[in-house]
Image (tube, grey):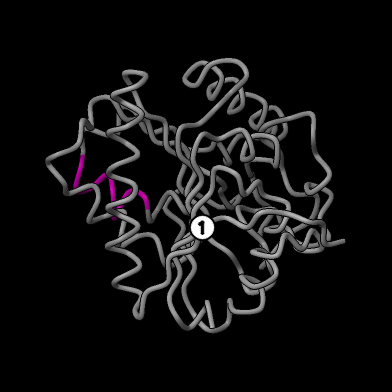
């Protein structure tokens, strides 16, 4: 069902590189804003291919108060530590390797725990410890899949219906893996949401997300505190 809704502002650039540099500038401003207002900044990052060069460039910046920044994960595949499928593997390589001081304030999703549902609850508790109650992350970085998924909120999975928890496990596997993910309530309470959308294969999903099409997972994410950075291929 598509409901009347106000789409988030969208900034369209010719190339993926321009999207990355503008998204980086936006994130730098929001980090400074959060630290100025609350003395700290909590940021959750997602996976995919697009964000890592941008996040690596952000991590190299010396004009940001990194000692006041905490990093969380939006989602993670249930896979062994160091696996190429893991978002944490990319986070280690592109962010923590260039800004080692962040390791102490980076909170990986505990996807290798034997009781995965309890592990999800523990991660939710960790978020509350850092972000207060009700839990509000300062910044959430999201991508959008060609099928309209975001985080690990994937089409047809029971995780889409979770409203009483901030962190949950997908009921089925997606692209070969079950996932731990932030849920809609956790994402929609964030103070700021940034979408980074790259590539012609995202064009239909981006159009539907901007229209608030709730038949795709991305269309259920709140638009009131969101901004979209997209390349011309995805924005049409």
Up-down: is 108 above or below 61? above
Q: Nearer the viewer, residue 16 or 91?
A: 16
The residue pinned by badge 1 equals 9
Up-down: is 125 above or below 95? above
Up-down: is 206 above or below 139? below
Please name the residue shown 74% across and 49% down the image.
170
Tell whether 113 sits left or right of 214. left
Tell whether 36 sits left or right of 148. left
Please name the residue shown 49% across and 40% down the image.
192
Q: Return the x and y of residue 2 as percentages of the image width and height.
A: 82, 62
Tell whether 202 sits left or right of 209. left
Q: Main secondary structure of the magenta part?
A: helix
Q: Nearer the viewer, residue 217 or 5?
A: 5
Q: Return the x and y of residue 165 as percentages of the image width and height.
A: 73, 30
User: What's drawn in magenta, residue-wise?
Assistant: 91-99
Please name the residue shown 53% across and 60% down the image.
143
- 98 in magenta: yes
The quadrant holding residue 186 is top right
- 156 in magenta: no
- Residue at the extreme left of the image, as rendered: 62
């Amino acid at each position: 069902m598509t409901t009347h809704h106000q789409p988030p502002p969208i900034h369209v650039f010719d190339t993926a590189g321009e999207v990355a540099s503008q998204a980086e500038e936006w994130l730098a401003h929001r980090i400074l804003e959060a630290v100025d207002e609350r003395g700290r900044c909590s940021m959750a990052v997602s996976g995919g291919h697009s964000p890592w060069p941008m996040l690596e460039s952000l991590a190299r910046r010396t004009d940001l108060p990194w000692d006041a920044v905490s990093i969380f994960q939006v989602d993670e595949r249930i896979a062994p530590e160091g696996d190429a499928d893991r978002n944490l593997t990319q986070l280690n390589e592109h962010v923590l390797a260039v800004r080692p001081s962040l390791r102490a304030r980076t909170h990986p999703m505990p996807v290798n725990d034997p009781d995965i549902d309890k592990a999800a609850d523990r991660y939710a508790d960790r978020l509350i410890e850092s972000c207060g109650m009700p839990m509000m992350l300062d910044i959430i970085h999201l991508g959008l899949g060609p099928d309209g998924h975001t985080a690990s909120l994937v089409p047809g999975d029971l995780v889409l219906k979770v409203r009483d928890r901030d962190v949950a496990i997908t009921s089925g596997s997606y692209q070969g893996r079950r996932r731990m993910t932030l849920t809609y309530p956790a994402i929609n309470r964030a103070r700021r949401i940034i979408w980074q959308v790259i590539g012609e294969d995202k064009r239909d999903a981006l159009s539907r997300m901007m229209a608030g099409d709730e038949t795709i997972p991305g269309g259920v994410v709140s638009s009131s505190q969101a901004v979209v950075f997209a390349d011309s291929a995805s924005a049409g």
